[in-house]
Image (cartoon, rainbow, N blue to C red):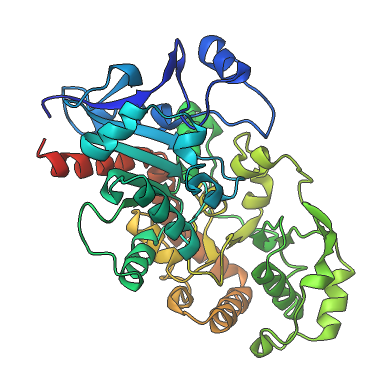
Amino acid sequence: MKQPIKIVYNWIGPRGPIWNTEIPNVISLAASQEGSKATSSFWWADDIWHKIFNAKSPQDAFKKHEPIFELHPACLIDDRDVFIYPFSLAWRVNMRNYFLADNGLLEFSHTQNHIIHQVRCGKGFFLIDLSAEAFVQDGQLKAMHSYFSHLKIPMGKIIYLTGCMNADVIYEKFCQRHGIPNDVLQRMNIISYPVSQQGFAQSLNSLPESHYATYDTEKVPEKLFLSWNRRFRRHRTTLALAMEKWGLVDRSYVSMGLTDPESNMEKFENTVDLFRDPALEISSEDVTRFIKKLPLVLDGETNIAQMCGDFNNATRQWYQNSLVSIVTETNYDLQELTLTEKSFKPLKEKHPFIIVGVPGALRAFRNLGFKTFGEFWNETYDEIEDPRLRMKEIVNTLREIARWDENKILDFKRKVNPILHHNFELLKKDLSLTVAETITNIIKSRYNL
């Protein structure tokens, strides 16, 4: 590449840029100048430059000697520059609010007119980062298309990072339904990015090997399964009751509240629907017996950041004393496939896993290079579209594992060890480098760089 791609910000301080999404405030100025950090959950800092474009020298990963990306002030951009103007969106804000006509993202952030013009007519791109969520529903995609169309900005100048792992399939169907031609100017560039993986990679690479998890192939654990559940979701409720029916709760580590931690008005019993999955044969007696056990508390942690990352390995004891993780992902009966921190935590702890999520979750893992466990149990549930049939097959898999005797458990642990080692080593490789390369290829192909 003859010239680096410029990563453009309005405000750049000694410790890096201030996000373009809002005009600077006292907190963001202090963070950029002094490196101070706010503990408020209502303030976000832009990390796109550090997370993707300046992380671990992307030019080294691409085997290039010249720089790939260059931090650059917005005021100096002209029509010769190939650039990306990034926006990091706050995940707790209703996404559609960012794309209201005449009162959306560009207006609220006071994006300079010459930047808008160079994206519209020149060689600039807007990067929208919402990789913490899987926001690719029809209404959300329609809002984005409507907003940028109103501003006469080609959708091909939009790069959208999302945590949805099947976003390309969903977006293709969206475009077909709405008659959007398969043209580089009329369709945005949508990239799946499981951003949670990066946090684990950075943490593992900063630690000495003595802090890494170990896997004892000669120990029969006290419990079969480990299942962390915080917020209520229908599939988590259903799975927990099915485990209760077959006597698996008492043989497992399971966390589950009596009330939802984010809404004391939402009680577990209100999430129960015995008629939803009749094939599971869950009875009212099973429900009553399980509710009497609530709340089921493991570590008692309430800090969300700590629960998501577990970077101090506080939960390691539960992984080391159980056989298989049951990962109850955020989405189950929706089309948006998520691989959140829940799916990556077992990899960090060298723990086999079963994912209770959207069809194709295991396939998405394998597409990232990770290995799953079809050699040891039936993983065909991952391709079952019907959520009821998929849950029944998952429960059947749990029941089959529950029949293993000690000899089979030890044989499994010895044979599965190479897979766990492979997944752990791959987890240490930051996927943001792949995202940076994908973005680079999009821009290079557009302008023959």
Q: Quadrant of residue 323?
A: bottom right
Q: Can residue 287 be seen at all in this image of the molecule?
A: yes
Q: Nearer the viewer, residue 274 or 306?
A: 274
Q: Residue shown at 42%/62% (left/top)? A: 372
Q: Residue shown at 63%/30% (left/top)? A: 43
As drawn, the residue found furthest toward the right would be: 292
Q: Residue shown at 60%/74% (left/top)? A: 398
Q: Nearer the viewer, residue 396 or 258?
A: 258
Q: Nearer the viewer, residue 218 or 188?
A: 188
Q: Position of residue 255 (x, y in %)?
A: 75, 58
Count how many numbered circles sit on residues in the image: 0
Q: Position of residue 150 (x, y in %)?
A: 38, 49
Image quadrant where one finds the C terminus: top left
Q: Position of residue 20 (x, y in %)?
A: 45, 28
Asked if residue 168 lies left or right of residue 449, the reply is right
Task: Answer above or below: position of 358 versus 443.
Answer: below
Q: Quadrant of residue 375?
A: bottom left
Task: Answer above or below: position of 388 versus 55.
Answer: below
Asked if residue 445 lies left or right of residue 283, the reply is left
Image quadrant where one finds the N terminus: top left
Q: Position of residue 289 (x, y in %)?
A: 87, 76
Q: Quadrant of residue 332?
A: bottom right
Q: Can residue 88 be seen at all in this image of the molecule?
A: no
Q: Nearer the viewer, residue 101 or 381?
A: 101
